[in-house]
Image: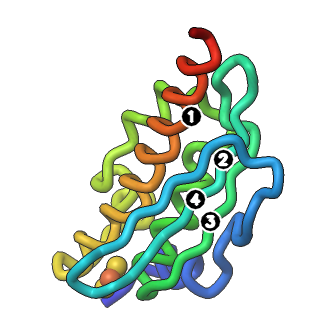
């Protein structure tokens, strides 16, 4: 049912935890299943994601997609990170069962949420 990559990221998730010096945090919950993802980002002055961690209280697919999202956007500029879709995440994981595709929304939405917050803060500081 799950690809080897999904199982690997579920059993050995990358970048788990919190970042004390995070300057962007995104949190998204799925009201249907109750699962929650929280992403912590450290973004530098050039808008590059220097570091990223996550905490996921959710199903195996939510853990695996969170782990993959952190790997895909670490070292990327935030504009590029924003183009990451749930389909790209699922593809990088070797596919997800159709009934689990909704789980991959959480990590990408948490990423968008964190970047939006970061941009708001940055603009507020400019003004
Ligand atoms: Fe809730 Fe997968 S069942 S995120």
- The Cα atoms of the two marked residues, 2 and 3, are separated by 9 Å
Q: Where does label 4 land, which residue?
A: 39
Provide the secondary structure element on which disc 2 rests: strand
- The Cα atoms of the two marked residues, 3 and 4, are separated by 4 Å
Front-most of residues 114 and 71: 114
Give the mark nearest the N terminus, 2 or 1: 2
Residue 41's tag is 2
Q: Does 67 sit above or below residue 113? A: below
Left or right of 13 on screen, residue 124: left
Total numbered labels placed on residues in the image: 4
Does the CB distance between marks 4 and 2 fall below 8 Å? Answer: yes
Q: Where does label 1 land, which residue?
A: 118
User: Residue 97, located in which quarter of the rendered image?
Assistant: bottom left
Left or right of 110 on screen, residue 48: right
Residue at left offset 40%, top offset 64%: 28
Does the CB distance between marks 3 and 4 fall below 8 Å? Answer: yes
- The Cα atoms of the two marked residues, 1 and 4, are separated by 12 Å
- The Cα atoms of the two marked residues, 3 and 1, are separated by 16 Å
Location of the N terminus by quadrant is bottom left
Residue lying furthest left: 98
Residue 54's tag is 3
Determine crowd level at label 3: few under 14, some 14-19, many 20+ residues with C-alpha closer than 10 A. many
Instruction: Report x, y in % for residue 84.
Output: 39, 42
Instruction: Report x, y in % for residue 92.
Output: 43, 57
């Amino acid at each position: 049912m799950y690809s080897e990559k999904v199982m690997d990221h579920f059993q050995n998730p990358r970048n788990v935890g919190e970042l004390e010096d995070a300057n962007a945090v995104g949190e998204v919950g799925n009201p249907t299943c109750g699962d929650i993802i929280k992403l912590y980002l450290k973004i530098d002055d050039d808008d590059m994601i220097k570091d990223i961690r996550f905490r996921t209280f959710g199903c195996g697919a939510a853990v695996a997609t969170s782990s993959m999202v952190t790997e895909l956007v670490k070292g990327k500029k935030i504009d590029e990170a924003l183009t990451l879709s749930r389909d790209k995440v699922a593809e990088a994981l070797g596919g997800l069962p159709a009934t689990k595709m909704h789980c991959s929304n959480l990590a990408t939405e948490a990423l968008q949420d964190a970047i939006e917050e970061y941009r708001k803060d940055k603009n507020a500081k400019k003004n």
